[in-house]
Image (tube, rainbow, N blue to C red):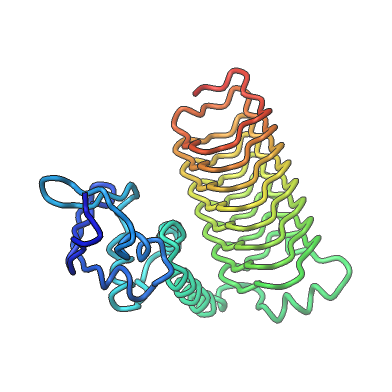
């Protein structure tokens, strides 16, 4: 055990099997309100390998070197959009708010550079949504920043929305049928009663989004982040949620019939009265999840 009084300047970490060596100062200085800072503040007793002295953290170590470099230098790494989605997921776990904001800033700059590839600009979109009925069916809007706009009832069906920034946008009742929205960011967006049938949202960030009664049937949601999202009464039949992060999400009354939940994180999620009949939950993380009244008839656990 690593006692408070034994906290020296150097620390050895085992992050999901990957070994790292750093200092207490690095882990606590830049992001003092993070979970890492709290762990190594000296206020807690940590479990330490008895032979080599490694502190074990049960997370994927793939991107932890980027986290350490951020804590050392404050520099956001240059990664692909899918890798940024993975890194944001780790930053959310460690509560590194500065890193999350830094990634969002880099992502916005990248989208500005890519905007010339889109068929319309943000200004064009603002002009269009002033009319009564707006359709962007099949239009290429990849890389645009559409954050904080009122896009309610807009029809985006069949559009290319790769890496679009929809953070805090009002998208209530919008249609996203069969869109390609891989890597898009819907952080804290309003998506109530939206239609995402057959949509590709691989690696999209929907943390904190309001998806109440949204239709995500047959959607590709592999690797998506739904942390703390509101998915009450959502339709998720046959959706692919492999490796998705739904920690703390509210799925009360949601229909997950036939959904793929391999390695999905549902820790602390509210699944009360959810329809999980015949769903394979064997490789799903359900620690602390609320399952009162859920239909689990024939579910594999």
Residue located 55% across and 74% down the image: 117
Is residue 268 toward the left or the right of residue 119 in the image? left
In the depicted structure, whether residue 18 falls above or below residue 171: above
* Nearer to the camera, 71 or 34: 34
Residue located 27% across and 72% down the image: 26
Residue 248, image x, y percentages: 56, 48
* Nearer to the camera, 142 or 18: 18
In the depicted structure, whether residue 63 falls above or below residue 116: above
Indicate the quadrant where residue 148 lies.
Answer: bottom right
Residue located 23% across and 52% down the image: 55
Residue 11, image x, y percentages: 19, 62
Q: In the current view of this chain or complex, which residue is farthest to the front?
A: 5
Q: In the current view of this chain or complex, which residue is farthest to the top?
A: 298
Is residue 77 toward the left or the right of residue 264 in the image? left
In the depicted structure, whether residue 159 falls above or below residue 284: below
* Nearer to the camera, 269 or 81: 269
Residue 261, image x, y percentages: 52, 36
Residue located 64% across and 34% down the image: 256
Q: In the current view of this chain or complex, which residue is farthest to the right?
A: 132
Residue 114, image x, y percentages: 52, 75
Q: In the current view of this chain or complex, which residue is farthest to the bottom?
A: 123
How many numbered circles does the render carry? 0
Indicate the quadrant where residue 190 lies.
Answer: bottom right
């Amino acid at each position: 055990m690593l006692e408070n009084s034994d906290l020296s300047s150097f620390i050895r970490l085992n992050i999901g099997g990957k070994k790292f060596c750093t200092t207490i100062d690095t882990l606590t200085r830049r992001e003092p309100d993070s979970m890492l800072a709290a762990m190594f503040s000296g206020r807690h007793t940590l479990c330490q390998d008895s032979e080599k002295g490694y502190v074990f953290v049960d997370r994927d170590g793939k991107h932890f070197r980027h986290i350490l470099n951020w804590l050392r230098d404050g520099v956001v790494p240059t990664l692909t959009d899918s890798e940024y989605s993975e890194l944001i997921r780790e930053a959310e776990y460690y509560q590194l708010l500065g890193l999350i904001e830094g990634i969002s800033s880099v992502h916005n700059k990248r989208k500005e550079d890519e905007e010339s590839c889109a068929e319309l600009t943000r200004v064009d979109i603002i002009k269009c949504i002033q009319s009564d009925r707006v359709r962007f069916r099949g239009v290429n809007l990849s890389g645009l920043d559409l954050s904080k706009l009122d896009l309610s009832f807009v029809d985006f069906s069949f559009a290319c929305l790769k890496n679009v920034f929809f953070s805090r946008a009002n998208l209530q009742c919008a249609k996203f049928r069969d869109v390609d929205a891989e890597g898009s960011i819907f952080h804290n967006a309003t998506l109530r009663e939206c239609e995402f049938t057959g949509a590709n949202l691989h690696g999209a960030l929907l943390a904190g989004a309001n998806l109440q009664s949204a239709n995500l049937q047959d959607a590709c949601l592999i690797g998506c982040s739904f942390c703390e999202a509101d998915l009450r009464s959502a339709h998720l039949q046959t959706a692919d949620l492999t490796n998705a992060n739904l920690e703390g999400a509210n799925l009360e009354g949601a229909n997950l019939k036939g959904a793929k939940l391999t390695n999905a994180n549902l820790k602390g999620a509210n699944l009360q009265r959810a329809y999980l009949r015949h769903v394979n939950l064997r490789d799903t993380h359900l620690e602390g999840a609320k399952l009162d009244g859920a239909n689990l008839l024939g579910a594999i656990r």
